[in-house]
Amino acid sequence: MEYHHLLDKQIKKLLPAQYLEDGAILQFLGAVNNSFKNFEKSIKLADHAFNVSEREYVTVTDNLRLQNEIKQRSISQLKEAIKALNPDAELNISDSDDDLIHIISFLHERIAKAKELEVALINSKELAEKAAMAKAQFLSIMSHEIRTPMNAVIGFTHLLIHQDPKPEQMEFLNFLKFSAENLLVLINDILDFSKIEAGGVEFESVDFSLTDLIKNIRLALLQKANEKNIQIKLMMDQDLPNAIIGDPVRLGQILTNLMSNAVKFTHKGKVTVTASLANSTIDSSTIDFEIADTGIGITPDKIDHIFESFSQASSDTTRKYGGTGLGLTITKRLLQLLGSDIAVESEYGKGSVFNFSLTFKNSKRQLSSTADGDEFYRLKSLKGTRLLIAEDNQINVILAKQFMKQWEVECDVAENGEIALMLVQTRNYDMVLMDLQMPEMDGYQATRAIRELPGDKYKKLPIIALTASAMLDIQDMAFTVGMNDYVSKPFNPNELHRKIELYSRQKESV
């Protein structure tokens, strides 16, 4: 039997050979030998376990050290980030084991304050929106109240001028017309400026003739230019497209502001309006505009300020020439909204030159010319046309009936929307001039009710909104309820005449 080396050494040293033949002794030695072997195995297992535990301990310790370093770096970066976000904040955090807890508490506090600030900002925003809405409603009411009597003043003055007054009366009527139109310009400038400031300007995309637009603006200013014995010359590029797509109303406003200013500040010489094709592609055309005059000019120290709100080139400009000082401001803002800008060159005492560029989409339509020659307003018979005027203001009714009489138009009057709805069902009209603000049933309600009547006749009946309101979205509202067009009061007789003629022709062609 092979004994453990330690046991074997002792047997050879101490136990006589004859005892190795005794079975009991051999059994005892076998048991002792097994104990030695088991003890040795236990020692080896213990050594192995110790070595493994030591390696794991070292690994865990290294990991803990690394995690602690990451924690400390994270805490330091959190402190730096908090201080960078709010340098003035008192960060009462000590470099201790609890600093992460302090940071979390601090952030908790800042989040709570941020939420309080957010609630305060939301409340302030709601108050500002209510104030803006109140301002818009105030402007709408004031516009309606001011424009309604202005409609009568301008309209009746226009009628009187065309009824062969005495020479001395003609002079007074021209003064009255001039003053009323100046007052209307002031009202429109203030309302347009408010619209732009409130972000309520929307641009149309319709087909129009640029050449006709400029010619018609010239015709509107021609009488004033003739009174001052100055010329308004147009230099139109022959390569200009027949029709473009854009907003003719806003472009007309820009050109009218610049051209009327040129006429106003020119005492001798001429005003030259140039439109030239700068670039053209299949889809679009870029057009350069220039308005030059030989007027009073602008001093170098004032040229940088003429586009500011309520600013004039000199302190006595308003007294001498009138105006709000908003025309150029509105022009610049409109051009900026259209993605352009305006430049000016001027020499005091010799004149000014304003220029800008705009890009339009090309229209596929071929438009016929609508310019009527040098006569701004021409009475043309519209005999055979029958229309309904829905209007509650008696002065406006008398004025409208006078124009209809001159144009040989048959007309009935409805004092409110309910009467208009009844008359439309009992009589045949070519169109309806619908005031929007009326008692009992307003123009919106009346239009909806007419459109809901059975039969194509009521769905195709032209309805033209006629109103003095200045709400920013009033035109969209009018179209939404089913109206076909829009004329604002005080209305331009030529514009109203043209639209009545247009819808009369459309109805005849159906």
Image (cartoon, rainbow, N blue to C red):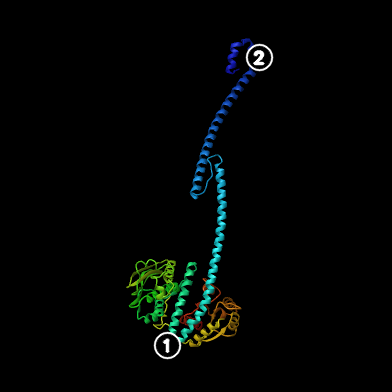
**Mark 2 or mark 1: which comes first in sequence?**
2
Residue at point 37% right, 82% down? 227
The quadrant in which residue 240 appears is bottom left
Q: Which residue is mark 2?
A: 25
Check disc 2 and give the amino acid type. Ile
Closest to the camera, between mark 2 and mark 1, is 1
Q: Is residue 170 left or right of residue 467?
A: left
In this orientation, which residue lies closer to the viewer: 348 or 384?
348
Tell me the quarter of the image containing the N terminus: top right
Position of residue 468 measured from the top left corner of the image (x, y, whole percent):
52, 77
At 56% from the left and 63% from the top, the residue drawn is: 127
Indicate the quadrant where residue 272 lies: bottom left
Looking at the rendered structure, the secondary structure element under dot 1 is helix
C-alpha span from label 2 to label 1: 162 Å
Q: Is the residue 142 above or below the residue 383 in the image? A: above
Viewed as shown, does residue 180 lie left or right of 227? right
Q: Under tag 2, what secondary structure?
A: helix
Residue 155 x, y percent position in the rendering: 48, 83
In front here: 103 or 235? 103
The answer to whether one can see residue 100 in this image is yes
Residue tagged by mark 1?
168
Task: Using the rendered image of the protein, determine whether residue 363 is visible from the camera's viewpoint.
Answer: no
